[in-house]
Amino acid sequence: SYELTQPPSVSVSPGQTARITCSGDALPKKYAYWYQQKSGQAPVLVIYEDSKRPSGIPERFSGSSSGTMATLTISGAQVEDEADYYCYSTDSSGNHGVFGGGTKLTVL
Amino acid sequence: EVQLVESGGGVVQPGGSLRLSCAASGFTFDDYAMDWVRQTPGKGLEWVSLISGDGGRTYYADSVKGRFTISRDNSKNSLYLQMNSLRTEDTALYYCAKGTGGSSNWFDTWGQGTLVTVSS
């Protein structure tokens, strides 16, 4: 079955840039989406269609995709950005969703 | 404001059945596809199933295909997940999530989840 691969953890100091990657064979043809999940809360969409930011999401969140890798970038990470981040996409049929394993972002 | 409220979770023995519900409000329900996503305690997210806005198309993860059935009642603004032949590995927090169009395959809003525990 199709898989998306993320690093288990990323750690940065406040104000630094955090980059979280997601790799998958179908990403050249399928969009990537990014969800933030803080402890005890439901996930929240932070990036859609590779690089678009929903209303209400801070400008420090951005996304990009090239080849088989999508990247979520948090420029000037804040302590409140500490969370698990999941990439999401679909298989080549477009009918079956798949999540990456999640990346725990630590900002301290 | 979009609201999704799941219910129906509980404790069930292996091999048993459970029906989850998701009550939607704040948007025109039948204009949007809906999904179920689950999260094993302390672990990651797993996409479970998708139903189109008109209910005519349904898709399932391989792990639940043949055991789970997604459905919707657009007159009641409600989404359902019938879960049969439950296994211990189905233990998870189950979220319903709103799609972004009638046949979209991604979602922009999640409920708070309902917990399903499969245990003898």
Image: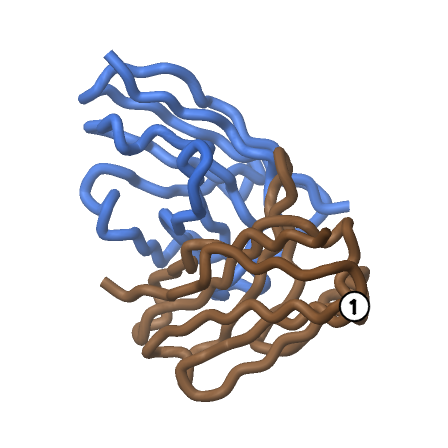
Chain colours: A brown, B blue
Q: Is residue B32 left or right of residue B42?
A: right
Residue A71 higher or lower than B2, as above or below = below
What residue do we see at 39% from left, 48% from top? B46
- Chain for mark 1? A
From the viewer's side, name the closer residue of A100 and B17: A100
Residue A2 higher or lower than A79, as above or below = below
What residue do we see at 39% from left, 68% from top? A90
- Quarter of the figure with residue A3: bottom left
Q: Is residue B56 visible?
A: yes
Q: Is residue A53 left or right of residue B110?
A: right
Residue bearing mark 1: A76
From the viewer's side, name the closer residue of A66 and A15: A15
What residue do we see at 44% from left, 67% from top? A89
Residue B67 higher or lower than B108, as above or below = above
Quarter of the N terminus of chain A within the rendering: bottom left
Q: Residue furthest top?
A: B120
- Quarter of the figure with residue B119: top left
From the viewer's side, name the closer residue of A64 and A6: A6
Q: Secondary structure at mark 1?
A: loop
What residue do we see at 56% from left, 35% from top? B76
x%, y% of residue A102?
48, 54
x%, y% of residue A107?
70, 54
From the viewer's side, name the closer residue of B64 and A65: A65
